[in-house]
């Protein structure tokens, strides 16, 4: 498929490379055809162009022909080599429009032969325009920018949703585990029961296997409370309760920090999604505008062809009428000639008869 595309691009670009090289080397043969187009449209461009750009617009027809030839040469080489082929195709499409209008204005021709020739060449260039437009849209089977933007947006939204759910689930589990472990150990300290302390220690060990750093904090608080229960000291129990409170406070702070980080990440992802969606919308708008412009140009061409066909039909009717009138005139002339010949013969016969009478 790559070899086929390379061959097709080279064949399509050959016409533009040759014509662009000729226009750069010797633009004079093309100047007379380009002058009417330049005289008509250059003032319009200068009128509506920004002031910063007007000074850089060439006013010499020869220079404009060379610029157009340079566009054809650069675009043709880019298309043929595959280096910047889509940009090169856009350059060829831009250069092809004024070239076609200037060189083949068949609607201004008077002779039918000239009009038919220019119409055929005009349609040939229109076909080339369609080819370079297709080349500009060709991504060689790879996803386009619009598809990539849409796919990336969907993937980011999906990942963000999963991350939010995972953070919320982990935060809830870790907080419950920390509070559950602390509550079990506090109950063991209050009951001062060896059996309760043993169960609390086992529960804390089991929770340590299934949770993260928050559970470690809860285990630290639980260990302090177990030591306080063993010492059976009110002061130790008070210190252990403070340690548990500090562990719970740390767990809540870390959970809040995790939630804030997740919210920040989600906000950044949403902002990026918005930018991607905006870019995709811009690309779709440009593509729709290009398609609309192509449709308008095709409609103009079809309308012009219809007018040409109508004019050709009128010309054929007029030619037929003129031929009929010429045939009628020839017939009348022939009839008059025969009548004159007949009268001449009669006059000659009468003259000979009179001569015979005189002689006799």
Image (tube, rainbow, N blue to C red):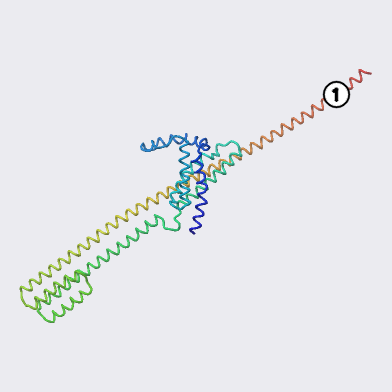
At mark 1, the secondary structure is helix
Drawn side of residue 116 relative to residue 266, left or right:
right
Location of residue 110 (image quadrant): top right
Drawn side of residue 182 relative to residue 48, left or right:
left
Drawn side of residue 129 relative to residue 172, left or right:
right
Task: Give the residue drawn at x 11%, y 81%.
Answer: 194
Q: Residues within 10 Å of mark 1 (few under 14, many from 20)?
A: few
- For this orientation, the residue located farthest to the right is 360
Task: Give the residue drawn at x 35%, y 60%.
Answer: 154
On the image, the x and y values in percent for residue 82 come to 45, 53
On the image, the x and y values in percent for residue 226 come to 11, 76
To which residue does mark 1 refer? 348
Looking at the rendered image, the quarter that the C terminus falls into is: top right
Location of residue 251 (image quadrant): bottom left
On the image, the x and y values in percent for residue 54 come to 39, 36
Question: Along the line of sight, which residue is nearer the eye, 268 or 346?
Answer: 268
On the image, the x and y values in percent for residue 273 come to 32, 56
Question: Along the line of sight, which residue is nearer the eye, 348 or 96?
Answer: 96
Instruction: Please determine whether, in this image, residue 248 is positioned above or below residue 263.
Output: below
- For this orientation, the residue located farthest to the bottom is 195
Drawn side of residue 223 relative to residue 262, left or right:
left
């Amino acid at each position: 498929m790559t070899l086929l595309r390379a061959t097709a691009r080279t064949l399509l670009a050959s016409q533009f490379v040759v014509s662009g090289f000729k226009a750069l080397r010797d633009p004079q043969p093309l100047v007379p055809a380009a002058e009417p187009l330049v005289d008509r449209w250059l003032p319009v461009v200068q009128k509506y162009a920004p002031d910063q750009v007007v000074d850089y617009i060439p006013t010499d027809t020869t220079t404009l022909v060379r610029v157009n030839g340079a566009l054809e040469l650069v675009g043709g080489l880019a298309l043929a080599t595959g280096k910047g082929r889509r940009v090169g195709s856009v350059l060829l499409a831009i250069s092809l429009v004024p070239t076609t209008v200037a060189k083949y204005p068949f609607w201004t021709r008077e002779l039918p032969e000239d009009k038919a020739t220019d119409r055929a060449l005009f349609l040939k260039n229109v076909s080339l325009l369609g080819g370079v437009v297709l080349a500009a849209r060709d991504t060689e089977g790879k996803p386009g920018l619009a598809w990539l933007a849409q796919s990336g947006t969907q993937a980011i939204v999906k990942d963000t949703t999963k991350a939010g759910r995972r953070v919320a689930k982990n935060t809830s589990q870790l907080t419950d585990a920390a509070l559950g472990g602390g509550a079990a150990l506090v109950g063991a300290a209050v009951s001062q029961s060896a059996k309760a302390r043993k169960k609390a220690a086992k529960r804390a060990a089991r929770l340590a296997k299934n949770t993260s750093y928050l559970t470690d904090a809860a285990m630290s608080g639980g260990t302090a409370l177990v030591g306080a229960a063993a010492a059976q000291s009110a002061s130790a129990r008070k210190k252990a309760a403070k340690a548990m409170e500090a562990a719970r406070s740390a767990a809540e702070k870390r959970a809040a920090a995790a939630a804030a980080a997740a919210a920040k990440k989600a906000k950044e992802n949403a902002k990026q999604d918005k930018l991607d969606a905006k870019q995709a919308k811009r690309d779709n708008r440009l593509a729709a505008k290009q398609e609309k412009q192509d449709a308008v140009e095709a409609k103009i061409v079809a309308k012009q062809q219809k007018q040409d066909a109508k004019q050709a039909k009128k010309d054929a009717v007029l030619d037929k009428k003129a031929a009929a009138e010429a045939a009628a005139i020839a017939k009348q002339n022939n009839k008059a000639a025969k009548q004159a010949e007949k009268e001449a013969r009669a006059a000659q016969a009468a003259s000979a008869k009179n001569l015979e009478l005189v002689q006799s």
